Image (cartoon, helix red, strand yellow):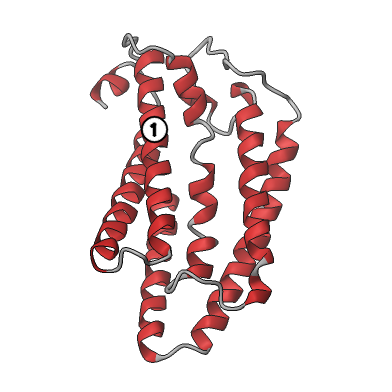
Amino acid sequence: DASIRAAGAPGLVERFGAFSVGVTAAYGVLAAAVYARRPQHPLVRWWLAIAALSAFSNLAWTFGLLGEWADWPIPGATWWLWLGGWIWVPVYWLIPTVMFALTPDGRLPSARWNPLMWVVGAAITISAIGWLLLPPSMSDTPEVFPPGYTAPFPSWTGAGVLLVVGAAFGVVAVAMSVTALVQRYRGAAALERAQLRWLVLGAAGTIACLAL
């Protein structure tokens, strides 16, 4: 971190890095704790996936920034920085959608909610493709990329359209997930309602961290 800061990398890197570390730790600990008591719990694999993707995203950003900003001899630093620019997408859509819809038993409230998973999949896929094709100069945080940086993968100036479409699917997925959560809460017993309240509290904390 000190090397990246000394090289002049923007401060927002630390903010998103801290968020990524927090997500990795929170979901990793949660998965380990539940696995120790109920290894077959359906949500364990989702928590592990979120923790692993978040950790890998942070690792990619770190390698890329150290190689590109601090001139560390890291092989493929250009690729690492490019990868860190879009591999985080699944985490950002999974947390406010799948986590809302599947908590606390790892299942959707009913079969009629099955289309939700397809909408989430569309949001993740389209958004990720949009970000990986987006030219660095068109990024909402172009200052992350050092002067003269060129993406190692072909860019497309029309990728912004994919971001809009992906975000539209994401908004629909979040709305469906919140609706599913409300439906589940209304028909839940006292213990399940308490679990859902903790979920909402955790979601509020996540939003607060992003807003800082």
Q: Residue furthest front?
A: 40
- Residue drawn 48% across and 57% down? 95
Residue 145 on image: x %, y %: 49, 21
Q: Is residue 138 left or right of residue 205?
A: right
Q: Is residue 62 visible?
A: yes
Q: From what the image shows, is residue 24 above or below residue 203? A: above
For the N terminus, the image quarter is top left
- Secondary element at image label 1: helix
| Viewer-closest of 15 and 75 | 75
Residue 122 on image: x %, y %: 68, 50
- Residue assigned mark 1: 13
Q: Is residue 11 visible?
A: no
Quarter occupied by residue 171: bottom right
Q: From what the image shows, is residue 68 above or below residue 193? A: above
Quarter occupied by residue 180: bottom right
Q: Is residue 151 left or right of residue 27?
A: right
- Residue drawn 50% across and 12% down? 147
Residue 96 on image: x %, y %: 51, 60
Count of numbered marks: 1
- Residue drawn 53% across and 9% down? 148
| Viewer-closest of 119 and 61 | 119
Quarter occupied by residue 58: top left
- Residue drawn 73% across and 46% down? 165
Amino acid identity at mark 1: Val
| Viewer-closest of 159 and 144 | 159
**Neighbour class for label 1 at 10 Å: few (<14), some, many (≥20)?**
many
Residue 103 on image: x %, y %: 45, 71
